[in-house]
Image (spheres, rainbow, N blue to C red):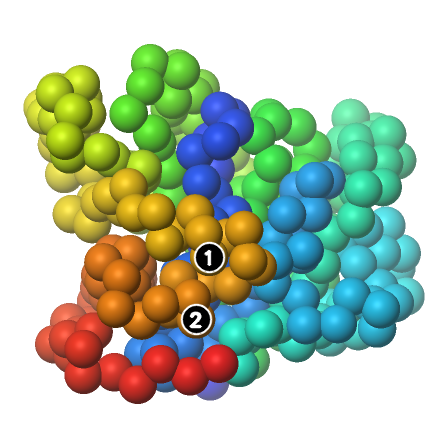
Amino acid sequence: MKMGFLISFVNVKGGVGKTTIAFNLSHALRLLRRRVLLIDLDLQENLTDKAIKDRDKVENTVLDLITRDEVTASECIYDTVVDGVGIIPSELEIVRVNKEIDPVSNPQSLFVLKDKLEAVKTQYDYVLLDLHPNVDILTTMALIASSHYIIPIKPDSYSLKGLKIVNEYAGNISRANRNLKEIGILITDLDKRTSLANTFQEALNDTFGHRVMNTVIKRNAAITAAAFNNSTVFQYDQRQPGCQYFFSLAKEVILKCEEVVIDTDYHGVGVNG
């Protein structure tokens, strides 16, 4: 059976849209008949709040998965508001991981998440990990467990600083996870009406070349409105350009991971869930 691709969304700069990207990408991948699992590793629980179908039914979170030996990944998976997409939810207490796990005395503890996910990897084509904007034990565990990562970046200087830190950090992690590959740098919230945004995009392409993904998530009010309503943009309004952005992103991710070209146009795909 084919092993799933585990993709982390990482940037030490907050507010770049990691949660929104993971949530909407999960729906787009599902439209392309991929099996998808979301994992929320952010103590703010934003992805959990948006995606989970019934919060009251949650008994185990990603914290339990990491810190309790007897808890398996399958016991932490719950339905989301997108049919066919599952989630391992987060909780505020996930911050305890940084205190309870000591990689200095026990280096193998950094591989707990990777080891636990081995049992469910074959059940999904894509596992999308939403990380918080910190370089810490949680981020290290996620990248060790991942096969790929995407760096979302907004058109501002702070995001560029975050990009530099991620470049160095991911390079260090690759020593422990030699299979880790970068899918690319994803430009988000781009307002093409401003000269600053256009200059930023040109400079980024000139500096990083092929590392910059072809897909650009342009500013679209419907994406923000959908997030506010705890829905994907596909669920909020199928006619919005934001749907095309994330559908294009899904096709590019599939191309990078599976080396499969998807010819299907967004308008030819039925939106369900």
* Count of labels in the image: 2
Q: Is residue 241 left or right of residue 29?
A: left
Q: Residues within 10 Å of mark 2 (few under 14, many from 20)?
A: some
Residue 68 sits above or below residue 235 on the image: above
Label 1 is placed on what type of residue? Ala
Q: Is residue 233 left or right of residue 146?
A: left
x and y percentages locating residue 157 in the rendered image: 33, 14
* Residue 107 visible, this angle: yes
Mark 1 surroundings within 10 Å by alpha-carbon count, few (fewer than 14), some (14 through 19), many (20 or more): some
Amino acid carrying mark 2 in the image: Gln
Residue that mark 2 sits on: 235
Residue 86 lies left or right of residue 251; in this view the side is right
Instruction: Look at the numbered discs 2 and 1 and tell me whether their residues touch, using CB distance below 8 Å.
Output: yes
Q: In the image, what residue occupies the spot 75% across and 72% down?
A: 54
Between 223 and 15, the residue placed more toward the observer is 223
* Marker disc for residue 65: none
Q: Earlier in the sequence, mark 2 or mark 1?
A: 1
Q: Secondary structure at mark 2?
A: helix
Residue at figure coordinates x 60%, y 36% from the top left: 132
Horizontal and vertical percent position of residue 95: 79, 35
The image's mark for residue 226 is 1
Residue 37 is situated, as x and y percent measured from the top left of the image, at: 56, 68
Name the quadrant containing residue 137: top right
Q: CA distance from mark 2 to mark 1?
A: 8 Å
Q: What is the secondary structure assignment of the residue under circle 1?
A: helix
